[in-house]
Amino acid sequence: MKKILFFTITSLVLILSACAPSTAPNGNSEMMDGTPTPGSMMMDNPEAAHMMEPITAPNVQPATETEGGQPLDYRLEEGVKVFELTTKAVQWEILDGVTVTAFTYNGTVPGPMIRVTEGDQVRIIVKNELPDPTTIHWHGVEVPNAMDGVPGVTQDPIQPGETFTYEFTAKPAGTFMYHSHYEGDVQVGAGLYAPFIIDPKEPVANPPAVDKTLMISEWRMTDGMTYAAMPMSGMEPNYFTINGKSFPATETITVKKGDLVRLRFIAIGQFIHPMHLHGVPFKIVATDGHPVPEAAQLTKDTVSVAPGERYDIEFVATETGQWMLHCHILHHTTNDNVEPGGLMLMINVVD
Ligand SMILES: [Cu+2]
C-alpha cells in the first residue's frame, strides 16, 4: 500500500511539473528543468550565439587540392614518424558550383589521412593559421592524457599563429579519426576532421582489394554564407558530404568482380546516417576501430552510423554493374532540397 501511494505521489509530481510553465522567478525559462532548447539557450546565453555565426576568415583563398583524406607524408626522426598539419581556412568545392568556406587541416576536407602501424611513435606538429584558437583530439586512439586535445582540461588552446606538438604511440590498430575539440560544434562542422588509420602490426592474411574510408558530414549554406550545420531549428543542413563532396561529385569506387571490398564509415557531423548498400549484403567487421569476432559479425545491408562512430564493413562484389551506396534518410540524398545529391556514391563493379 505504501509503495502504491509513493508511486502515485511521484507520478502526480511528475505530471504537475511537466504541465507547469518552467519559467524561473528571474525570467530565465531554462534554469528550472535544466534541459534548454538551443533556440532559447541563445537568448539566455549570448556566448552560445557563436553557433549562429557564418564560417569566415580574412582573405580566404580557393583550395589548391581537390581531394580530401589523402595519405599524409611523414619524415622519420630517430624512429619517430613526424607529420605536419596546418589549420587554415579555404574555399572548398563540395559540388560543381557550390563552394563552402571551410576550416581545414592542410587545405582539404577531410584533412589528410594519417596512416601508421600499431606501435609506431608519432609526432604531429600543428600550426594554427585559423582566426580562432583550436586543438586536436585523436578520437579513439589510446593517447596519454596530456595529448587528448581537450582545451582547458589537458592543454591550453592553440592560439592563432601558435604551434603545438602532439606525440604518442599509435595504438590500438583500427579506424580512428582526428578532429578539433575547440568549439567543436562549429569547427568540426566547418571541416576540421580527418581519418587516422592504424594498421595492425601483423598484416592480415587476405587484405581487401579495395579499402576506402568515407567520412560523412553536413553543411548549411544560405545566401552564399557557410554555417556549421546543427541539429537545431534554423541551422539544419542543406548539403551533405562524403569525404567533402556531395553526389554527383562524390568518388565513384571501381572494383573488380570478385574483389573483397572494405569500406570504413566515419560519421563526424551531428546527424545519424543509415548507410545502405545496393546489390549485396555486407558484414560488419569492426566497430569504432575494434575488430568484431567472426562469429559475432552481423550480415546487413544498412548500418546506422551515429556521430563519432566508425563501422568497417566488408563485402565481395559478386555482380557487375553500378551499385549505389547511400544514406537512407532520403532527405540526406539531396543538394539544397534537390534530388539526387548528398550522401550517395556509385560502386562500379567491372569484369
Ligand atoms: Cu543521412
Image (cartoon, grey):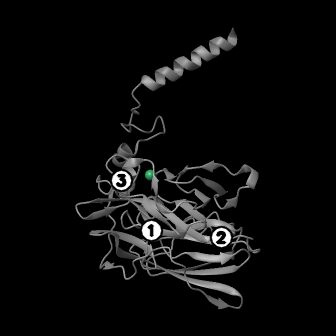
Label 1 and label 3: CA atoms lie apart by 44 Å
**Disc marking residue 116:** none
Residue 199 at x, y = what percent?
68, 73
Amino acid carrying label 1: it is Thr
Inspect this view and state whether residue 91 appears. Answer: yes
Q: Are marks 1 and 2 in contact (CB under 8 Å)?
A: no
N-terminal of the pair, mark 1 or mark 2, is 2
The residue beneath circle 3 is 46
The N terminus: image quadrant: top right
N-terminal of the pair, mark 1 or mark 3, is 3
The residue beneath circle 1 is 252
- Describe residue 84's horizontal placement relative to residue 333 as left or right: right
Instruction: Give the quarter of the image for residue 30.
Output: top left
Q: Are marks 2 and 3 in contact (CB under 8 Å)?
A: no
Amino acid carrying label 2: it is Ala
N-terminal of the pair, mark 2 or mark 3, is 3
Amino acid carrying label 3: it is Pro
Q: Residue furthest left?
A: 223
